[in-house]
Image (cartoon, rainbow, N blue to C red):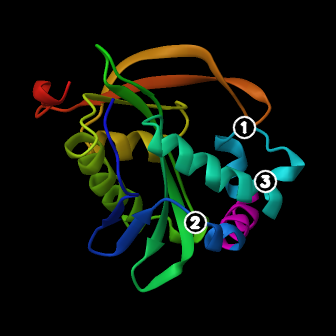
């Protein structure tokens, strides 16, 4: 198990990526509320309490606990020019170590921030951290066939298509097919294994 001592702060040219704190709860709710209709076709149906402070106070603590136990890394994206407003998320989840050293990637970006290269920039920084600092060997990322923007993003980042899964995830109220992709760490360190 990797020993992690502090929550990461990943900085790119224009962005800051970090785990949320309790001070971010209002901004998290605002991000998901403002982008509710935009994100709905790409996400599971949300329970009503998802948009409450009580839910996110618990979730922020849970996300930190998971990170400290080497189970996930759930980052929010902020512009360096406006470091208090959340514009997206990048989640590395379901950490598996042992002979696998793998995780899953999921992400979202505010509707108003689309088309400016923010997610490419954010994921380049986050993937470098996951590979170099957390020593993951493989990141899997899956997308629905009609989500060409996501497919193009993953291709730009070097993800390779590995397969097609029918009825893979229950998204927006129905089972959705997904294209399965992955990226492997060519510099994985066995010494840390």
The location of residue 191, given as percent across then percent down, is: 11, 27
Q: Nearer the viewer, residue 15 or 176?
A: 15
Task: Say which residue appears at 60% left-offset and 65% top-offset.
Answer: 111
Q: Is residue 18 magenta?
A: no
Image quadrant of residue 100? top left
> What SS does tag 3 mark?
helix
Q: Is 2 left or right of 66, judged from the image as shown?
A: left
Q: Is 164 left or right of 177, judged from the image as shown?
A: left
Give the alpha-carbon distance from disc 1 to disc 3, as whole Å: 16 Å
User: Which sits earlier in the primary sequence, circle 1 or circle 3?
Assistant: 1
Task: Say which residue appears at 76% left-offset and 64% top-offset.
Answer: 33
Residue 92 shows up from this direction: no
Query: Considering the image in quadrants, where does the C terminus appear?
Result: top left
Q: Check whether the beta carbons of the residues at disc 3 and disc 2 lie within 8 A of each other.
A: no
Q: Which residues are magenta?
A: 27-37
Residue 55: mark in rendering: 3
The location of residue 94, given as percent across then percent down, is: 49, 29
């Amino acid at each position: 198990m990797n020993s992690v001592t502090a929550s990461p702060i990943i900085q790119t040219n224009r962005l800051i990526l970090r785990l949320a704190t309790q001070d971010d709860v209002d901004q998290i709710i605002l991000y998901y509320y403002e982008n509710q209709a935009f994100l709905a076709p790409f996400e599971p149906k949300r329970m009503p309490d998802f948009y409450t402070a009580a839910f996110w106070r618990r979730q922020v603590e849970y996300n930190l606990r998971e990170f400290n136990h080497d189970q996930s890394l759930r980052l929010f994206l902020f512009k360096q020019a406006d470091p208090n407003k959340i514009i997206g998320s990048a989640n590395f989840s379901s950490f598996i170590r042992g002979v696998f050293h793998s995780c899953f990637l999921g992400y979202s970006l505010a509707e108003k921030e689309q088309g400016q290269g923010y997610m490419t920039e954010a994921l380049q920084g986050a993937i470098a951290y996951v590979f170099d600092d957390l020593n993951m060997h493989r990141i899997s990322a899956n997308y629905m066939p009609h989500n060409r923007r996501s497919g193009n993003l993953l291709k730009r980042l070097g993800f390779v298509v590995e397969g097609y899964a029918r009825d893979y995830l229950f998204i927006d109220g129905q089972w959705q097919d997904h294209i399965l992709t992955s990226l492997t760490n060519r510099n994985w360190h066995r010494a840390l294994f």
